């Protein structure tokens, strides 16, 4: 375009056709600002614009989301009657749709004297793609269309997929006279997002043609359902069938590894990326940083981060959150200040990572300071997640009254995360009155979850208020809710093994339970006394101690001790917060068996080594 512009500048009297060629050239080369500048210059020189000029000008306004300029252009078109041109009017519809004003788009559509399939599809896609998808109106327009091409059918199928109505999406799919690969892929991605993976596989196998997008949809479905073994199996099958994965495939598989802490598989994917010389762009490198961080391998995460030539805010956030979650709050904050020095503007997620870092090590003053400066320094308006972090920070530090006052002064209505953080802190510090207040709000916000009532019953039990314990128990029975069962998982030789409390379904369960007995004997010999305060209240003390032996993370550790080489690190994922007894027991186990044990619970990582935990017993 630079060379074209030089030639243009040498012309004495360029015609409207030549001006249009330049305007089209800038727009086609993604330079909307220059497109509009050339249009302004054209008007200044009194060159007559025509129906070939305006479509590209309108598209430039759409690219820039410049609603004011777009409306001005619309006004010019109405004065010149060019708005009646089918090509111009269709671009106006697409402009208003892209700016979120479907009402005006529909008015332009209604005033068109002639419409084609493109204009019908443009207004229909407006109702499909707006934030509050209106499929009733989209269906009405679709039904009125005189002719429907494959794009119109695909737009409607995509709309029903978007709202999760796979039944209607499938009906339309079956009715469509033409089904291209895109049509199949849209329905497949819908099944992957909203249905059981068995349905996804059946549909995938029935497809007459498949591309990398098809494979990615199936892998994405497995990832979404946390079925990493199947995702990896499908990834390997993809290679056997000579379908080359792309960046989306690799990011999806790395995301699966991050979800379940599958470090071995994640390292293999990294090796595969290097071996096949994939371009290490920001998205792929960020996925690697995120995977290593969420698997507790911070050295590897930092190595990838440091080698990156280009980083965006998402990359910085992944590394900051990685340090924060793994108990290295000082490094998280150092990285945050380095980010500012490199003039990378933090966003809302960055501040959550920073506040979490302060929370996990009790840096109350630093947390207060960062929260107060969020808006002043960076223009970031605190959201509920930020308020939840602050309540958690104050509550964990024992500043319960300040945490309560903070909630009372919030400009937003507190959500479950805010009240849940306060309740957990009340449990730690035995504040019954404030716990009751928090539980009342939690029940109002979430009628189904029994975890709050379970916590409240244990707070009452620890305070010796047995009548209240009985009352809560009756309420839980009436609501038919109970405590969420603990579940732990770990990766051994590329396979994910899962363990539930007192489960005996693992193929090596006999060996696991023998190892549990051995662990228990050694713990007693080392002077460990079971902490039964967090076991459900209606269990006798002896049974409580027995129940603690078979917590899911202890079963996973037992399996790790018999299934891995001596001296190797045992890595475990848990769906709940690690309990007091397991925490103290695992510290001793790491020392007795000379193993590093990494546990990722619902809130953070615990790195146990030589009888010490990285959290410093502050969690």
Image (cartoon, rainbow, N blue to C red):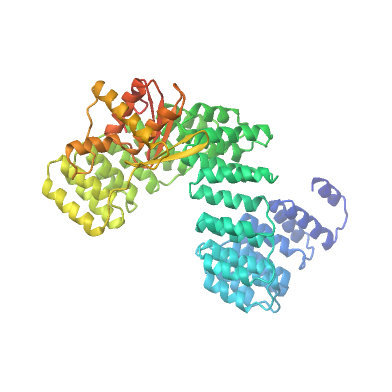
Look at 24% across and 47% down and name the residue there: 454
- The quadrant holding residue 54 is bottom right
Residue 237 placement (x, y as % from top left) = 63, 45
- The quadrant holding residue 595 is top left
Give the quarter of the figure containing the C terminus: top left
**Residue 448 vertical placement versus 297 (above, below):** below
Residue 77 placement (x, y as % from top left) = 69, 70
Q: Is residue 500 left or right of residue 227?
A: left
**Residue 153 vertical placement versus 598 (above, below):** below
Front-most of 354 and 546?
546
Look at 78% across and 59% down and name the residue there: 45
- The quadrant holding residue 282 is top right
Decide if residue 228 is in sight here.
Answer: yes
Residue 229 placement (x, y as % from top left) = 52, 43
Front-most of 473 and 229?
229
Q: Is residue 302 left or right of residue 468?
A: right
């Amino acid at each position: 375009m630079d060379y074209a512009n030089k030639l243009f500048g040498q012309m004495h009297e360029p015609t409207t056709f030549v001006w249009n060629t330049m305007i089209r050239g800038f727009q086609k080369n993604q330079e909307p600002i220059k497109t509009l500048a050339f249009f302004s210059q054209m008007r200044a020189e009194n060159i007559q614009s025509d129906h070939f000029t305006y479509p590209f000008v309108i598209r430039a306004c759409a690219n820039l989301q410049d609603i004011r300029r777009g409306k001005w252009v619309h006004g010019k078109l109405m004065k010149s009657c060019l708005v009646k041109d089918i090509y111009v009017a269709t671009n106006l519809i697409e402009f208003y749709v892209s700016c979120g004003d479907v009402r005006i788009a529909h008015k332009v559509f209604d005033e068109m004297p002639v419409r084609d399939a493109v204009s019908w599809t443009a207004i229909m896609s407006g109702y499909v793609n707006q934030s509050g998808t209106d499929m009733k109106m989209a269906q009405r327009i679709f039904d009125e269309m005189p002719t429907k091409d494959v794009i119109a059918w695909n737009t409607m199928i995509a709309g029903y997929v978007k709202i999760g109505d796979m039944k209607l999406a499938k009906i339309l799919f079956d009715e469509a006279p033409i089904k291209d690969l895109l049509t199949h892929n849209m329905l497949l991605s819908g099944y992957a997002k909203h249905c059981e993976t068995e349905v996804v596989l059946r549909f995938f196998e029935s497809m007459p043609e498949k591309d990398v997008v098809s494979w990615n949809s199936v892998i994405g479905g497995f990832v979404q359902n946390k079925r990493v073994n199947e995702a990896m199996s499908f990834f390997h099958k993809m290679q056997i069938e000579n379908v080359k994965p792309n960046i989306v495939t690799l990011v999806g598989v790395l995301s699966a590894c991050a979800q379940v802490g599958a470090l071995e598989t994640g390292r293999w994917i990294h090796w595969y990326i290097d071996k096949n010389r994939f371009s290490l762009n920001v998205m792929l490198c960020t996925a690697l940083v995120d995977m290593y961080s969420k698997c507790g391998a911070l050295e590897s995460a930092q190595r990838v981060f440091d080698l990156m030539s280009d980083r965006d805010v998402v990359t910085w956030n992944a590394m900051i959150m990685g340090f924060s979650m793994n108990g290295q709050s000082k490094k998280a904050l150092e990285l945050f200040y380095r980010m500012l020095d490199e003039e990378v503007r933090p966003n809302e997620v960055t501040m959550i990572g920073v506040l979490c870092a302060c929370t996990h090590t009790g840096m109350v003053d630093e947390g207060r300071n960062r929260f107060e400066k969020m808006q002043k320094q960076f223009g970031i308006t605190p959201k509920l997640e930020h308020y939840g972090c602050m309540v958690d920070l104050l509550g964990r530090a024992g500043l319960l009254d300040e945490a309560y006052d903070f909630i009372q002064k919030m400009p937003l209505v507190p959500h479950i995360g805010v009240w849940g953080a306060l309740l957990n802190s009340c449990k730690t510090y035995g504040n019954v009155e404030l716990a009751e207040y928090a539980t009342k709000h939690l029940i109002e916000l979430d009628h189904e979850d029994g975890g709050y009532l379970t916590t409240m019953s244990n707070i009452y039990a620890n305070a010796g208020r047995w009548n209240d314990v009985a009352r809560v128990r009756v309420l839980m029975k009436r609501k038919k809710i109970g405590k969420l069962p603990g579940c732990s998982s770990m990766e051994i030789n590329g396979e994910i093994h899962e363990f539930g409390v007192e489960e005996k379904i693992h193929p090596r369960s006999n060996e696991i339970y023998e190892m549990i007995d051995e662990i228990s004997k050694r713990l007693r010999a080392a002077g460990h006394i079971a902490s039964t305060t967090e076991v459900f209240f209606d269990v006798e003390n002896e049974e409580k101690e027995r129940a603690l032996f078979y917590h899911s993370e202890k079963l996973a550790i037992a399996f790790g001790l018999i299934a891995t080489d001596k001296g190797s690190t045992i890595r475990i994922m848990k769906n709940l917060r690690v309990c007091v007894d397991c925490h103290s027991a695992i510290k001793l186990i790491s020392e007795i068996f000379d193993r590093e044990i990494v546990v990722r619970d619902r809130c953070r990582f615990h790195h146990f080594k030589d009888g010490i935990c990285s959290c410093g017993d502050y969690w």
